[in-house]
Image: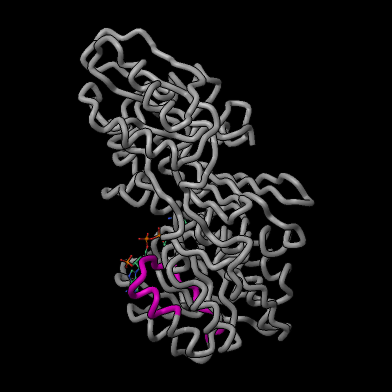
């Protein structure tokens, strides 16, 4: 039985998880493939300090990734390092050396995945990236194969486990954002620098990859309107609850008559919607197709083992292709043509909106705000005010009938002179029951 040889670069959470799955599950994997996946070499900066799983005693250890990329007996390089500098050199170097690449790197793939795919095609090798989005959910395989016969009209996701964990903790305990974040950092659920997670940047990279795959268009992170969760207060969950909703960081890509509207932003989600039940560090993706209608995918968004499974499954697919000599070439990044699904501005988005104000209370505030909204043709749906003791910082909410993001922005700009506002209003779209 001829083996396919793998080199692993990066022995952190994902690298070690991958090695665990590869070694503990080696017999099953060999049975499924009909040949063995053999780890030939591993690489990390501090490789000598790493304790590898049993069975890998004879594997070459190196701290220089070039050694792995250059080795003629390695067929597939797994880039499990992260970042866009060294990782890019590793991926490009491996492809140039005629090796297929498996990566978990959403940041790199969102940044230059399409170009990397083109060079992989030219080199006659494969580039697989299942682990880069929603760790344990095989959403790439679903979009590339499972429902590829459908025509996707909308894709919604909860794609960042850390921010979902923080939101659902605020929801559950009524604890302020800063305290939940500090606790999440203490428990190791959030990075010391939490920006990529709580400001929506990590989710944005993932949405760029998924939307490119779902809609077959070239999409870059800059096409995606992005807003994080830092401004969400416990009281927002109380108001959302009164409206029969909760709050999630929703990633969405939806077709409109003019083009594709892409956003990552906190949104009100009806309690009856399946996305509202996604709690803690879980991820979910909801896809709506013209023919197949709605399908939903749920699972762990990260973690060494779930992500390790995604990497190993990619290694198996690519290894099968290498052995059979019949390359499967379904691009995860189409197309030349920009048309039906061309990204357009979020200002064209049309929805009901939730506007939360923090004001120093005085007579006439609601009338004033309603006037500004009316001037922009926006109809008030409801006004909600939970009794509060501190009249100097009174949070209350206005919900409005469906309107455009553009009108909402103009109305908010029109309120900027009002000195009773303690901060600019927080605006969130209210999603339909998905
Ligand atoms: N963590 C997750 O659950 C998860 C889920 C999905 C996707 N991902 C993605 O998977 C990738 C890896 O994430 P991770 O959490 O495993 O990161 P990590 O724990 O920080 O591990 C990174 C590894 O890369 C090694 N490394 C860094 N620079 C290197 C270089 N120049 N040469 C050789 N090795 C180098 C590090 O070596 P040392 O240990 O020796 O310093 C470390 O072993 C990222 O792209 C991430 O976005 C992670």
How far from the left and from the top, in percent, is residue 141?
66, 61
Q: Is residue 87 magenta?
A: yes
Residue 179 percent location from the top left of the image: 28, 30
The quadrant the N terminus occupies is: bottom right
Q: Position of residue 376 (x, y in %)?
A: 43, 32
Question: What residue lies at 56% left-to-right and 75% top-to-bottom?
Answer: 127
- Give left or right: position of 76 versus 188: right
Where is 434 relative to 52, above or below? Answer: above
Numbered marks: total: 0
Q: Residue at x 45, y 60 (%)?
A: 14
Q: Which residues are magenta?
A: 74-91
Let me know if residue 333 appears in the view: yes
Q: Is residue 274 left or right of residue 349?
A: right
Please, is residue 91 above or below residue 252 in the view?
below
Of 266 and 180, which appears nearest the observer? Answer: 266
Give the residue displayed 68% in from the left and 71% down from the top: 30
**Residue 6 x %, y %:** 54, 78
Using the image as rendered, state which of residue 258 and residue 228 is in the foreground: 258
Q: Quadrant of ligand 1?
A: bottom left
Q: How is the image coloured?
A: one colour
Taking the magenta stretch, the answer to whether it contains residue 396 is no
Q: Residue at x 27, y 9 (%)?
A: 363
The quadrant in which residue 31 appears is bottom right
For the C terminus, the quadrant is: top right
Quarter residue 278 falls in = top right
Residue 22 visible in rendering: no
């Amino acid at each position: 039985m001829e083996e396919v040889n793998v080199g692993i670069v990066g022995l952190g959470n994902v690298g070690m998880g991958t090695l665990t799955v590869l070694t503990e599950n080696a017999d099953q994997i060999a049975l499924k493939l009909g040949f063995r996946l053999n780890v030939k070499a591993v690489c990390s900066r501090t490789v000598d300090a790493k304790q590898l799983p049993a069975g890998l005693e004879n594997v070459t250890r190196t701290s220089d990734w070039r050694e792995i990329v250059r080795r003629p007996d390695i067929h597939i390089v797994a880039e499990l390092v992260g970042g866009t500098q060294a990782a890019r050199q590793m991926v490009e170097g491996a492809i140039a050396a005629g090796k297929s690449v498996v990566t978990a790197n959403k940041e790199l793939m969102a940044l230059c995945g399409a170009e990397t795919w083109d060079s992989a095609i030219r080199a006659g090798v494969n580039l697989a990236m299942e682990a880069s989005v929603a760790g344990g959910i095989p959403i790439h395989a679903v979009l590339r194969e499972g429902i590829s016969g459908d025509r996707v009209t909308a894709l919604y996701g909860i794609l960042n486990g850390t921010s979902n964990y923080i939101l659902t903790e605020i929801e559950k305990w009524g604890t302020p954002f800063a305290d939940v974040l500090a606790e999440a950092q203490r428990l190791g659920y959030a990075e010391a620098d939490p920006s990529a997670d709580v400001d929506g940047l990590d989710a944005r990279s993932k949405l760029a990859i998924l939307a490119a795959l779902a809609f077959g268009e070239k999409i870059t992170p800059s096409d995606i309107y992005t807003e994080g969760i830092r401004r969400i207060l416990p009281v927002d969950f109380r108001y959302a609850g009164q409206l029969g909703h909760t709050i999630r960081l929703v990633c969405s890509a939806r077709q409109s008559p003019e083009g594709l509207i892409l956003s990552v932003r906190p949104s009100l989600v009806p309690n009856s919607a399946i996305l509202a039940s996604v709690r803690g560090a879980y991820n979910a993706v909801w896809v709506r197709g013209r023919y197949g209608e709605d399908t939903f995918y749920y699972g762990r968004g990260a973690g060494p083992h779930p992500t390790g499974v995604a990497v190993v499954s990619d290694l198996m697919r690519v290894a099968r292709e290498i052995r059979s000599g019949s390359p499967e070439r379904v691009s995860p990044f189409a197309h030349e043509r920009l048309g039906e699904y061309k990204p357009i501005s979020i200002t064209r988005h049309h929805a009901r909106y939730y506007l939360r104000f923090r004001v120093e209370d005085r007579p006439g505030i609601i009338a004033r705000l309603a006037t500004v909204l009316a001037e922009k043709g926006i109809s008030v749906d409801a006004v909600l005010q939970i009794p509060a003791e501190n009249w100097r910082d009174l949070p209350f909410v206005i919900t409005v009938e469906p309107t455009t993001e553009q009108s909402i922005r103009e109305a908010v700009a029109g309120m900027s002179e009002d000195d009773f506002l303690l901060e600019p209003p927080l605006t969130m779209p209210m999603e339909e029951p998905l």
